[in-house]
Amino acid sequence: MRTRATAALAALTLSGVVLAGCGSASAPSAPTGVDGLVIPTPDPDPADFVARIDNPWLPLAVGSRWEYADLATGAATLTVTVEAGPSVDGVATTALVRTGADGTVVRDLYAQDRAGNVWWFGREGQWQAGEGGAEAGLAMPAAPRFGDGFRTASAPGLSEVATVDARDEEVTVPLATYHRTVTLDVEDATGVRVEIYARGVGLVRTDEAGLVAYDEAR
């Protein structure tokens, strides 16, 4: 894939990696999976993608299930499952299906490249890469690095940028306490939200909700 990366509130370097300031006490980070990528990508090559999404920070095995609850009230807020998705822009995708407490269903489509990076290819009923000028963006690098920023997608009316805000901070949710984590600050037109991912599990916490159950695909 060719090199292009853009991000709000971060500097665009010639290498194609968006880096936010890490503070004077932080040593330079080694390169990670976002280096050398086109983000978003205008012409994904199906040969660059694999059938399974096994990125350790965003594992999306068909049949997996996550349940979340409001951290303040304990009320159930969201159930997430994984299904096989359609082909988008020539690439076979995996569907992450989110069902809210009110029954609202949202299906997001993802695919993983050979290097282990996970790409967001669309949201059913709203946009798909390759249609109407929409392009797939990066959902999760293979090796997230503190300070890296990237566009999660490019579509009419959609402008969303994720920045790796922390690595390996202890996070406690109703299900468990996790130590190997990645924290993303995701900014869109509505503001900034926090998403925390645990290695081998996926999303475990947002601003208001935490993981209460996780059933890994067998």
Image: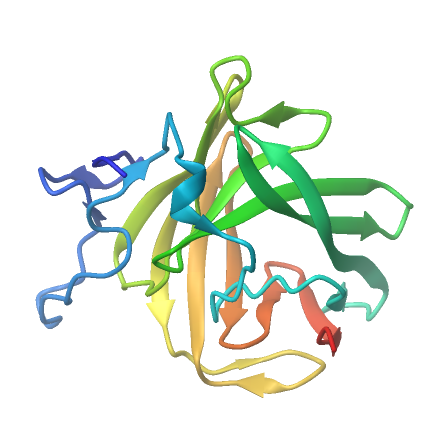
Residue drawn at (52%, 42%) of the image:
120
- Label count reads 0
Q: Nearer the viewer, residue 154 or 74?
A: 154
Give the residue furthest to the front.
47
As drawn, is 178 to the left or to the right of 40? right
Residue drawn at (25%, 57%) of the image:
147
Quadrant of the rendered image containing residue 154? top left
Q: Is residue 109 above or below residue 59?
A: above
Q: Position of residue 210 (x, y in %)?
A: 68, 69
Q: Position of residue 201 (x, y in %)?
A: 59, 74
Residue drawn at (52%, 67%) of the image:
197
Give the residue furthest to the top.
132
Q: Quadrant of the C terminus?
A: bottom right
As drawn, is 49 to the left or to the right of 10? right
As drawn, is 9 to the left or to the right of 86? left
Residue drawn at (72%, 69%) of the image:
71
Q: Is residue 163 above or below residue 201?
A: above
Q: Position of residue 114 (x, y in %)?
A: 38, 56
Q: Quadrant of the N terminus?
A: top left
Q: Is residue 26 above or below residue 39?
A: below
Q: Is residue 42 above or below residue 50?
A: above
Q: Nearer the viewer, residue 47 or 52?
A: 47
Quadrant of the rendered image containing residue 212? bottom right
Q: Position of residue 205 (x, y in %)?
A: 60, 66
The way the protein has been coloured in the rendering is rainbow
As drawn, is 87 to the left or to the right of 39? right
Quadrant of the rendered image containing residue 137? top left
Q: Nearer the viewer, residue 118 or 66?
A: 118
